[in-house]
Amino acid sequence: MFYRYTLFVLLLSLISCSEFEMKENYYLSFEDIPSGAPRTWIPKFMPTSSTKIREKHKVDSGAILLTFYFGQMKDLSLIGSCEVSDLDGLWFPPIYFLDVSWWPYSLTNPYVINVSHDMYTFYKCDQEQAYFALTHTGGKIRGYFWRESSKGGGIKGME
C-alpha cells in the first residue's frame, strides 16, 4: 500500500511540474497585456493594433506558439526581424507541440496537405529558428509565430 501511495504522489508531482512549465494566455487586444507581465514571448514586430492574441509557451525552453489578428500590413514591421522564405528550411511544429487545439493543422505539416504561398506568406526570423506566417482571414490579417526553443537567450527580434 505504501508503494502505491508513493508512486501516486510521484506521478502527480511529475504531472504538476510539467503543467507549471507551460503558460497559456489570451488577450482581446495588445493593450490588455499586463504592463508588468514578462513580455519575452512578444515579437518586437507584433503590431500594437493586434487583437485576439493567443499564445502558449514553455517557460524553461522558450518554445512558443502565438497567433494574433491585425487590420493592415502597414502596422507590421518585419524589417530587420524576419525575411520572406519558401517552405524549404522552415521548421513546423508537430501536431502535439505544446498541446494546443487552436493551432492550424496546415502549420504542422504543410507538405502533407500541400500548403502553398497562396494560403500563407512564410518568414524566417533571425538565426534562432523562429518563424512567422501570414494569412488573410475574414477581412483581417492573421499572424502565426512559432519557435522550438530560445537557445542562447532568445531570438533577436524579441524584447
Image: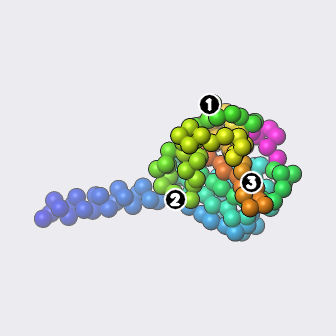
Q: Indicate which disc residue 18 carries.
A: none
On the question of residue 10 being in view, the answer is yes
Q: Which residue is mark 2?
A: 101
Q: Residue at x 87, y 51 (%)?
A: 74
Q: CA gap, disc 2 to disc 1?
A: 25 Å
Q: Which residue is mark 1?
A: 89
Q: CA gap, disc 1 to disc 3?
A: 23 Å
Q: Is residue 71 left or right of residue 131?
A: right
Q: Is residue 105 left or right of residue 46?
A: left
Indicate the colouring scheme.
rainbow
Give the residue type at disc 1. Answer: Gly
Element at badge 2?
Answer: loop
On the question of residue 151 being in view, the answer is no
Q: Is residue 5 magenta?
A: no
- Pointer 2 or 3: first along the chain: 2
Q: CA gap, disc 2 to disc 3?
A: 20 Å
Q: Residue at x 70, y 45 (%)?
A: 120
Q: Quadrant of residue 23?
A: bottom right
Prevailing SS of the magenta stretch? loop
Give the residue type at disc 3. Answer: His
Above/below status of 59 relative to 89: below
Q: Residue at x 72, y 43 (%)?
A: 118
| Foreground disc of the pair 1, 3 | 3
Q: Which residue is mark 3?
A: 136
Circle 3 crowding by C-alpha within 10 Å: few under 14, some 14–19, many from 20? some
